[in-house]
Amino acid sequence: MRAALSLADVRAAAARIQGAVLHTPTMEMPALSRATGATVYLKLDNLQATGAFKERGAANRIALLTERERKAGVVAMSAGNHAQAVARHATLAGIRSVIVMPKFTPATKVVRTENFGAHVVLHGETLAEAAAHAHELALKEGLTFIHPYDDPAVIAGQGTLALELLDDAPEVDMLVLPTGGGGLVSGCAVAAAELRPQVKVFGVEVEGYPAMAQRLAGQPVQVGGPTIAEGIAVRDVGQLPTDLLRQLGVEVLVVPERAVEQAIALLAEGAKVVSEGAGAAGVAALLAFPERFRGHRVGTPVCGGNIDPRILANVLLRNLLRDGRILRLHLDIPDRPGVLADIATRVAAAGGNVIEVSHQRLFAAPSVQTAELELMIEVRDHAQSDAIIAALQAGDYVVRRG
């Protein structure tokens, strides 16, 4: 009996989507290697036209439509990258596309999807309600529903990422792949198992949404909560991807939210690469489990770069705080002339750079004779932070870290 999916299917998908989907670069990243202890190769699928790997599966599935299906059109449900991928490749093929998105979908994502040529329908308060409506439209209008991950053609398309990575970086001995519904990791695992069986494949989930890890362990799926890795925040993983991962013995690692934020910041600062939360999950696993990867040659994709600029800015600032490169201080100070100048002089003498000041007299201070001062100071490291605090305390200021 033929396997559900094989390397031949992935190779056929690669031939099918050639020219429609970028062969993105795979590059060794010394900054990431230094930070993790592994030799790290990044596959930059954030450079795809829609900013994410989802184009691979969507392009392959659409290329396989029958003539009748092409005339009727396609429908998909997504609040993210799958929506834009289906819209773009349906439009390139001259096919009508309908994308159902939940009502809460940010306007920027709706506009982007429409700009790729789709008709967007906002329906439902949840992803499940939007999906149900998409299936209703498929039945009512004869549209072909394109699933984001539980479809062999989509999985084969996603597996082309591993073909390219292993061809461009043949020295890689491990692959680490973000895992939402399971399409990417299962497609890549299928390709690697036949093409390079000595390569060990890992999936990665975020701790609030470890659905695939729970399914593979035979546990009830319990997920929920806010996460910056919303692209892999999936409750209902695909049955076919689950079967493939179980068959191939793929281990799924679960990383903390903080590791994803650290990975986004490391990619931006160290590799000069912009990644969304889900796209940085592979690097997050290298940071969270260094003992698993130290000394190995690891390939991992930045599989999406669609992050809100405000969220990216917040992540970078939070990381500066954690690294001790921004010092936040609260001071209770006497309310008299010259105090602010004295504090600024002491900070400057210790080499700090004040980047934000909040001075509150009326409400926060414990006495009308005092004021509360909050400082944000740019510093080199924890040692310089300690020096600044010591300089302020030497002036008899009461200092608390923020």
Image: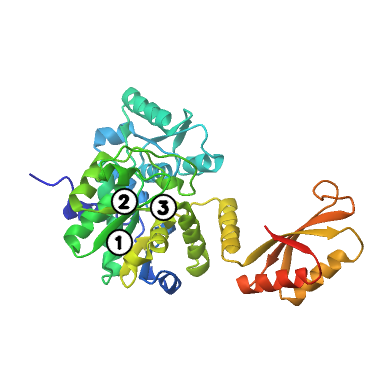
Residue count near mark 2 (Cα–Cα under 10 Å), binned few <14, some 14–19, many ≥20: many
* Horizontal arrangement in the rendering, residue 332 relative to residue 162 (left or right): right
Residue in the picture at 43% in, 57% down: 280
Tell us which disc is closer to us: 1 or 2: 1
Helix, strand, or loop for circle 1?
A: strand
Residue in the picture at 48% in, 51% down: 306
Labelled disc at residue 215: none
Q: Nearer the viewer, residue 206 or 274?
A: 206
Residue position marked by numbered label 1 in the rendering = 175
Quarter of the image where the N terminus is located: top left
Q: CA distance from mark 3 to mark 2?
A: 11 Å
Residue position marked by numbered label 2 in the rendering = 184
Q: Is residue 74 above or below residue 155?
A: above
Circles 3 and 1: CB atoms closer than 8 Å: no
Q: CA distance from mark 3 to mark 1?
A: 18 Å
Residue count near mark 3 (Cα–Cα under 10 Å), binned few <14, some 14–19, many ≥20: many
Q: Amino acid at mark 1?
A: Leu
Q: Amino acid at mark 3?
A: Ala
Q: Position of residue 72 (x, y in %)?
A: 32, 31
Circles 1 and 2: CB atoms closer than 8 Å: no
Residue position marked by numbered label 3 in the rendering = 52
Q: Residue furthest top?
A: 140
Residue in the picture at 19% in, 65% down: 198
* Horizontal arrangement in the rendering, residue 118 relative to residue 187 (left or right): right
Mark 3 vs 1, N-terminal side: 3
Mark 1 vs 2, N-terminal side: 1
Q: Position of residue 21 (x, y in %)?
A: 35, 55
Q: Residue furthest left?
A: 1
